[in-house]
Image (spheres, coloured by chain):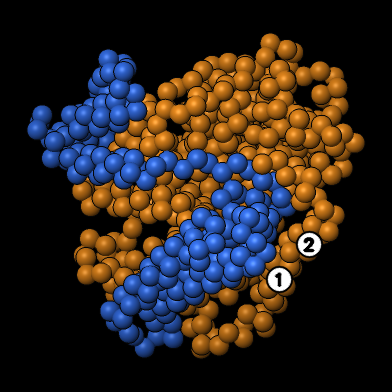
Chain colours: A orange, B blue
Amino acid sequence: MDTLIDLGGGFASALEPVSLAFALLGVLLGTVVGVLPGIGPISAIAILIPVSFGMEPVHGLILLCGIYYGSMYGGSITATLIKTPGEVASAVTAIEGYEMARRGRGKAALATAAIGSFLAGTLAIVGLTFLSPVLVKLANVFGATEYFLLMATALLLASTMSSGSRAKALVSIFIGLAVGLVGLDFQTGLPRQTFGMSLLSDGIDFTIFAMALFAIPEAIRNLALGRGAKDVIQSFGDDTWMTKQDWQRSAMPWARGSVLGFIIGILPGVGPSLASFMSYIMEKRISKRKSEFGKGAIEGVAGPEAANNAGVGGAMIPLFSLGIPGSATTALLLFVFTMYGLQPGPLIFRDESGLIWTIIASMYIGNVALIILNLPLVGVFVKLLKMPKEILFSSILVLVVIGAYAIEFSLFGLMMLGIFGVIGYLMEKGGIPLAPSILALVLVPLLEDNFRRMLQISGGSFMPLLTRPVSLSIILLMVAGIIAPIIFRWWVRRRQLLADVSVG
Amino acid sequence: MKTMSPALKGDVITGSAVTVVGLVYYIATFWIQETKNIVTPRTFPAIVGVALILLGVFIVVQAVYRGKKAAEVGPGDGDTASASVDGDGATASASVSSGVVLDAPEDPPSKKVVLQFALFFVYLALLIPVGFLLSTAAFLMTMTSIYARDRWIRNLIFSVLFAVIIYVAFVYGLAVYLPVGILG
């Protein structure tokens, strides 16, 4: 009941004209940036963080949450019409959605994505609304040991569940940790890993790192590729939005995708991308129309898109109630909170309860705005796909340069941006995923702080990890979380799904 | 090594680079002052350095081992053998846990990448002394014209307009004061 009162209060302030305007602006801005080929939610938020400098915390956060939602939806437009997913999460949409568009069913693909996203997104926020207060109560018994463990779990899961090589995902995490440790040690004030440069003693700015990694390599790669074969933009057809049969075929995938996405989203360190892949595989497996998959099956769009957006809501739960981000994107949001001097976690629900509930309420509003604005405006967004690449990517380079300048106001900050841009490019070339390093960079101060406190309390012994009941349960869950995917893979391989799902 | 596929060769390079980075990072920890705490300021950086070294070595060993195995199977099968091991390591395409294989993005020629980065660094260096408006317009003009030389009129209009609009928006709209440089 208390929750409903809090939420009501949140709605009261989220519906104020200014807050409402920021929610709408965020969704719109997010969609516009997300539609741009090659730009996914992470890049969109990273590029747009500087815009929120100097705003009221609540407005800045409402804006960025809106951008997150909007860019996810924008990404599915791009995936459907030119088969260029902005990030892994919409990669499966690029398979079925694009095939649907090729068959003149683009409108139906976009509609099922939008409606599924709306339903799943809303359900996930309902989950967030009611689960967060429970988790906050639970978190009151958490000590340094549990926090350390949760963060270590998040990092470990982020490496085991990402695509490609696990060793390389771990490399990415350790690169993030390595960057995060540069600067003055907060406990002793001693300089660390500064290579004698006093400018490095403030550490490496998170936004500069994020912008450098997520905008520069992609921009440079596209500019260097030069004018190649033009992207074929599928028209989204003048066909009706969705037929009765489309609704029938989409309903169950939406429901299954929502549940799956929400559960996966809550897991620390596992973002929505895994949710959309698992949903795709699940839909394909249980479908009676297996032969249609790969040729434009609507289930293959409805399920993953729902899972994707449910995952976003799910990932907000550990972020809000424990202060632990579940993915690179939520890590960016955590950074924005701390930029405003706010620390998500149990305390924020007590000390800043008005703020946090306003943000939660604005997410409901953002989701409604997404569907009201975006289905009718899809024709406008599609025009953005035609933007010449050289103009798009050179503008992005300028925008990140402004962002970096606005943070440091120095040549040093600008050079950091360039250097990490090169590092990001080399990482991508070497097959090292970029996202885990962002998560690690955000978590490293908390990880180290809690690790130190844990050992100080116990006098240097690691036993509390096993003797504290909460900590022991987390360890057991963590072991299960690592073993489960291995069993899942083995089971999938046994069923020889590998062969018939391959599309490449 | 001769029969190694490009992907595996790439892994040897990546792994070696990671090892070198880890080594440099670990050596740098020797300059951190030790304290008497249980977890000293050096503990975490040292763990990170060692972990990077080990991971780098692991990636190299794994690639060499796979290369040998592929060579035994026969030179022609090398690529396919490494690619079907659920993307763990050597594939250029991203295959996610359960076998949805995505097309790998195209790789641009290295020479062009170096050129683009060089131009970007020139822009970064000139931004403050020359000022935002002039350096940005010049940078945009250069980048767009390398890409599409024939459309120089459009490029020029875009470069100037974009620089001016962004300048006005940030300075007057968001109160982010961009460098004025020689125009100031």
Horizontal and vertical percent position of residue A9: 60, 39
Horizontal and vertical percent position of residue A469: 70, 77
Q: Is residue B73 visible?
A: yes
The chain to which mark 1 is attached is A
Residue on which disc 2 sits: A490
Considering the numbered disc 2 on the image, is that residue within a helix, a strand or a loop? helix
Residue at 22% in and 70% down: A196
Q: Which quadrant of the figure has residue A153?
A: bottom right
Residue on which disc 1 sits: A479
A478 lies above or below A465: above
The chain to which mark 2 is attached is A
- Which of these two is toward me, B107 or B96? B107
Q: Is residue A315 visible?
A: no
| Sequence-first disc among 1 and 2 | 1
Three-letter code for the amino acid on which mark 1 is drawn: Val
Extreme top residue here? Answer: A238
Q: Which quadrant of the figure has residue B35?
A: bottom left
Residue at 49% in and 73% down: B57
Of the 4 image quadrants, the one containing the C terminus of chain B is: top left
Give the foreground label among 1 and 2. Answer: 2
